[in-house]
Every structure is written in structure tokens, then in C-alpha cells.
Image (cartoon, rainbow, N blue to C red):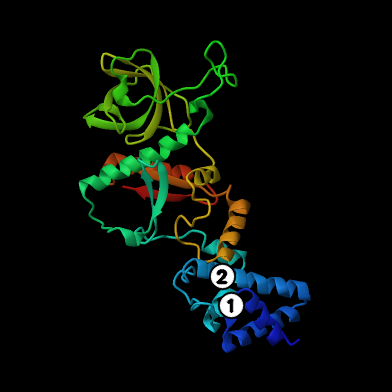
């Protein structure tokens, strides 16, 4: 059987029909693969990989390649085939060069938490109006979403998971210290003893800091506070606090950043392990190459994220200069992200 008939039959077996020009392109690919010394099995693997990529783009709505050529129905065009083959010929350096991308916030999906259903979903850009000049409610929603993302991560940790089996002392059979409960701020009224709270540090009055969650806010007293995690805590940070409410003031005993979680565990927990969260990966091939690059070089890279940076303040500018000096000897240099 000739290569032309064999390739046509293979594509038909996968529900695809090759245009004549696309078939000529595919024959050229097969010939070049044979010329570089690949055996028949390796060439067949190349063909099947091309088919898988074409079908993957069709599943994504025919535009999974970020606006490049696509298939019409089951017909494979020459433009689509050339596009797919070009992606497969990109080497690790090509993909690595594209690993850091600047994405348009107006076109990437937005992660949204539904408090009623208690689940996350990706909201496409086309399903909501986006503007640079948001209303006041947009800022409130941003902080609510930030809090919800951290809260559900905290509640998945063993220390905050209620145990079904306890011993006679009322403690968990697996953990002699038992489990802890996150107390909402509004529930502090009338309760004594130490409590665990999750909230954002805000400055309601000049020089006076409060802990705020989605229920209420309470003044803070840091005179006896101990920081249990590395780094530092800033205004508008979400923190985990162990403290006691006395006369309407929360006296902080221990404080720290929320418990961290592996990225893959987080994505799996919120049900997005098979989603392109940033809508930025053009093909399955690029995704696999980026994954290889992350495994090989991921530990060397660093992101420094700063929020609520007031560039009109001389004191802030001075601190930024000091921070940049501290990172000047790092190799590779970190990527700095300024938010707000």
C-alpha cells in the first residue's frame, strides 16, 4: 500500500479527512522523518501525535491554537497541518523563551468562587463586561474572592478538619491535640478563651489596625504577638491569628501567614486540574514542554509579588530600592509583580 493511501486511511480511522494539499504536506513530513533515520514505528508515532493534536484543537472549539488556522468540521487543511507540525518542531529553548508571558487581563478567564455552591469556576472574558474603571463593589468582590480562596485552602488542612473518631477525652484518635475551628469575627462576642481567626489586617483609623473577615471587624492588640512564619505581615494581608477577645479587643498571641499548599493540590481541589487557567497554552505539545521546563528549572525561578504599593510615597520608594538591592545578586533575577 502506498504512503498516500495509508495516511488517508489512518486519518479516516480517526474521523478526519485530509485535503489534497494537506496530504501532500503530510507526505513531506513523513519523508523528512525517514531521511533523518527514524524507523517505521517512530514515524507512525509522529503521525499519531499529529492526529492527537488536531483532535485536541477541535475539542477546544477549533481555536485552541490561540487564533491560528483551524479545521472545518472533520476536514484537515494544509494550513492547520503546517501549524501543528511547526509546534512539534519547536525545541525546548523555543518553549522556554515563551514561558514568561504577559497576559491581557481583559481576555484571560477569571477564577470565581460561588459561596452558595461552595465551588470555583472559570468565568470567560466574553461573559462579563470588564473595564479599567471598576465600581466600588468590584473592590469588595476582589477582597471577598481573595479571602474565599485562602479560607477553603485552610479548611482542607488536617489541623482544621473535624475528626469523626475521638477518644474518651474528646480528642482525636489520630492527633492528641485535637482539631481547631476557625471562628468568625462576629462570633467573638460573649466568648472567652483563645480562638483561631482568619482575616485581613486593615487600618480603619490612622494608626489603628483591625482584623476583618466577611462577617465583621475587631480592633487588634499586638503587644504580646509572636510571628510564627517567615517573612513579614503587611496591611491588607490575610493572616491566621490565635488570640483572645477581651473588652472588645482581640489580643493577638500568635500570628502568621496562611498555611501553604502544593500548587497541584490546590488546582486539583478546586476542580481545575484539566483546565488552562490562564488561557495561554496554544497546544498540548506546548503544555508538555512547559511542564518539562518547570520540572527542570522551576526551583531556580522566583516571583516577588507586592500588593498595595503606593509609589507616590517617598518612604515606599526608599523601601523598594532597598528591596531591589537585596535581590541584585540573585541569578536568575526574580520577576517582580506590582499589584495596586
The kind of secondary structure element at disc 1 is: loop
Give the residue displayed 67% in from the left and 77% down from the top. Answer: 10
In this view of the protein, can residue 247 be seen by the observer?
yes
Instruction: Judge left or right: residue 168 versus residue 212.
Output: right
Quadrant position of residue 55: bottom right
Which numbered disc covers residue 16?
1
Badge 2 crowding class, 10 Å Cα cut-off, few under 14, some 14 to 19, many 20 or more, is some
Cα distance between the residues tagged 2 and 1: 9 Å
Q: Nearer the viewer, residue 249 or 227?
A: 249
The kind of secondary structure element at disc 2 is: helix
In the rendered picture of this protein, how many numbered marks are placed on residues? 2
Badge 1 crowding class, 10 Å Cα cut-off, few under 14, some 14 to 19, many 20 or more, is some
Mark 2 or mark 1: name the one nearer the start of the chain: 1
Q: Percent position (x, y) of residue 255?
A: 41, 25
Q: Disc 2 designates what residue? A: 55
Q: Percent position (x, y) of residue 319?
A: 36, 40
Amino acid at each position: 500500500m502506498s504512503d498516500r493511501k495509508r495516511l488517508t486511511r489512518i486519518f479516516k480511522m480517526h474521523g478526519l479527512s485530509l485535503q489534497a494539499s494537506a496530504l501532500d504536506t503530510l507526505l513531506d513530513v513523513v519523508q523528512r522523518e525517514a531521511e533523518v533515520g527514524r524507523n517505521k514505528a517512530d514515524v507512525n508515532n509522529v503521525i499519531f501525535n499529529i492526529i492527537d493534536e488536531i483532535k485536541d484543537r477541535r475539542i477546544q472549539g477549533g481555536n485552541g491554537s490561540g487564533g491560528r488556522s483551524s479545521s472545518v468540521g472533520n476536514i484537515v487543511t494544509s494550513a492547520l497541518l503546517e501549524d501543528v507540525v511547526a509546534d512539534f518542531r519547536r525545541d525546548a529553548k523555543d518553549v522556554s523563551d515563551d514561558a514568561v508571558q504577559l497576559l491581557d487581563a481583559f481576555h484571560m478567564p477569571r477564577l470565581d468562587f460561588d459561596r452558595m455552591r461552595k465551588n470555583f469556576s472559570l468565568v470567560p472574558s466574553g461573559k462579563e463586561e470588564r473595564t479599567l474603571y471598576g465600581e466600588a463593589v468590584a473592590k469588595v468582590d476582589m477582597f471577598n474572592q481573595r479571602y474565599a480562596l485562602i479560607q477553603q485552602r485552610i479548611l482542607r488542612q488536617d489541623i482544621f478538619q473535624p475528626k469523626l473518631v475521638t477518644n474518651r477525652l474528646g480528642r482525636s484518635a489520630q492527633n492528641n491535640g485535637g482539631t481547631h475551628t476557625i471562628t468568625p469575627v462576629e462570633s467573638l462576642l460573649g466568648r472567652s478563651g483563645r480562638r483561631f481567626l482568619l482575616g485581613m489586617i486593615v487600618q480603619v483609623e490612622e494608626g489603628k489596625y483591625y482584623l476583618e473577615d466577611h462577617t465583621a471587624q475587631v480592633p487588634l492588640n499586638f503587644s504580646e504577638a509572636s510571628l510564627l512564619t517567615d517573612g513579614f505581615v503587611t496591611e491588607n494581608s490575610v493572616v491566621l491569628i490565635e488570640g483572645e477577645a477581651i473588652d472588645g479587643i482581640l489580643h493577638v498571641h500568635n500570628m502568621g501567614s496562611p498555611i501553604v499548599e502544593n500548587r497541584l493540590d490546590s488546582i486539583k481541589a478546586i476542580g481545575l486540574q484539566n483546565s488552562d487557567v490562564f488561557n495561554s497554552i496554544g497546544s498540548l505539545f506546548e503544555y508538555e514542554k512547559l511542564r518539562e521546563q518547570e520540572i527542570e528549572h522551576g526551583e531556580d525561578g522566583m516571583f516577588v509579588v507586592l500588593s498595595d504599593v503606593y509609589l507616590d510615597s517617598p518612604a515606599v520608594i526608599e523601601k523598594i530600592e532597598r528591596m531591589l538591592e537585596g535581590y541584585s545578586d540573585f541569578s536568575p533575577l526574580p520577576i517582580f509583580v506590582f499589584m495596586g
